Image (cartoon, rainbow, N blue to C red):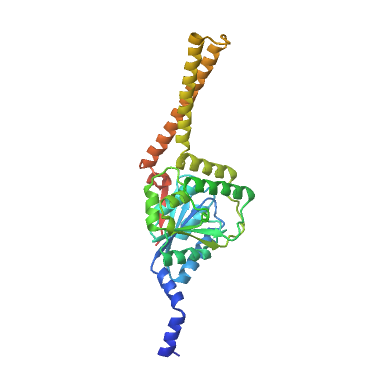
Amino acid sequence: MLPSPSNAKATEAGHQIADRAGADVRNFKYSIVVPVFNGADKIDELFCRIAETFNSKGCRYEIVIVNDGSTDSTWEKITRAATGNPNIIAVNLTRNFGQQPAVLCGLANSTGDYALTIDADLQNPPEELFKLIEPAVEKKLEVVFAKFTKKRHALYRRLGSNVIYFLNEVIFDKPKNLSISNVRLLSRDVVARMCRRHTPFPYINGLALQCSAPEKRANVMVEHHKRIGSKSTYTPVRIAQLVGIIIMNYSQLPKVISNIGFGTAWFSFVLTTAFIAKHYFLSSAIPEYTPILAVLTGCCGILALLVGILGSYCAKMAQSISAGSAGSACTNYEIGSIIKGG
């Protein structure tokens, strides 16, 4: 039986907020970007759960999955799932580039109004993604980071995360009350700005912070499950490499090194001149050691000058590479193939 007009108005008033939120999220298309390396055991479940989540909300979506040089049957399973499925865009990289370039490649090949990044290991349930979407749509946010109720990572990874958190605060001016993670929502404008950076050493969270307004960022609490099955490829070596990438490509360290080198060189040359002048014009208390001190100080000055030149060269090289057209795994020659279902 259809409700009466009065009951209908009461029902509409009682569900006004929920209906409005549901209508808002259905007005946009979402790109779920998933980098994967040797994750064949979870591909089918991943696709199924993402599809169920977005279909249940009546939202348009696409899954941009990037095979980062897997050596198992991952690409075969992706190909099978993508065949005839218009919601899957499968990108196969020519080799293993690492998580950060793979995510940037996925973002570059996405078309949604909002892009969401998630790992393929299902530690971050796809069902939690709408916790990021709803506040982003309602408040017109540019970046939303997931904040985990309880992290299920190994100790070394938590320690590495703490180091990276510190670097984000120092280098990218990340507010202390903002948590960052690999599960994030990015607006189309932010994605476009990030891809225009053309950096060969991408760091997604850093780029997101650089390309978004501070007042348009937020955190939401999401679940984080224990890893089951295949082992994580985020090893201590990879964490150390990421720390190195952040320091060398996004910080002022090369410039600081060059300034220290040039400053030390000038001080050494002045000290050498003082030793020589004292020896020949003012007489030295220990004359036999003065030439040795002068030579040693001069050599230290030369070494410091070389360090300064090297630091300056590294800084200029990083700037020139970043300004070039080679954008890491976003370039066509590093993509083996792209399959668009449908």
x%, y% of residue 177? 52, 56
Residue 60 visible from this viewpoint:
no
Q: Farthest residue to the front: give it.
A: 282
x%, y% of residue 219? 50, 60
Q: Taking 297 as reference, is 131 above or below it?
A: below
Q: Farthest residue to the right: give it.
A: 155
Q: Is residue 296 left or right of residue 334?
A: right
Which residue does the image show at 52% across and 44% down from the upper left?
242
How many numbered marks appear? Answer: 0
**The N terminus is located in which quarter?**
bottom left
Q: Taking 161 as reference, is 145 above or below it?
A: below
Which residue does the image show at 41% across and 35% down from the upper left?
317
Q: Taking 333 as reference, is 295 above or below it?
A: above
Q: Nearer the viewer, residue 271 or 42?
A: 271
Which residue does the image show at 42% across and 86% down from the upper left?
8
Which residue does the image show at 46% across and 81% down from the upper left?
14
x%, y% of residue 257? 48, 33
x%, y% of residue 275? 51, 15
Residue 74 visible from this viewpoint:
yes
Q: Taking 116 as reference, is 263 above or below it?
A: above
**The C terminus is located in which quarter?**
bottom left
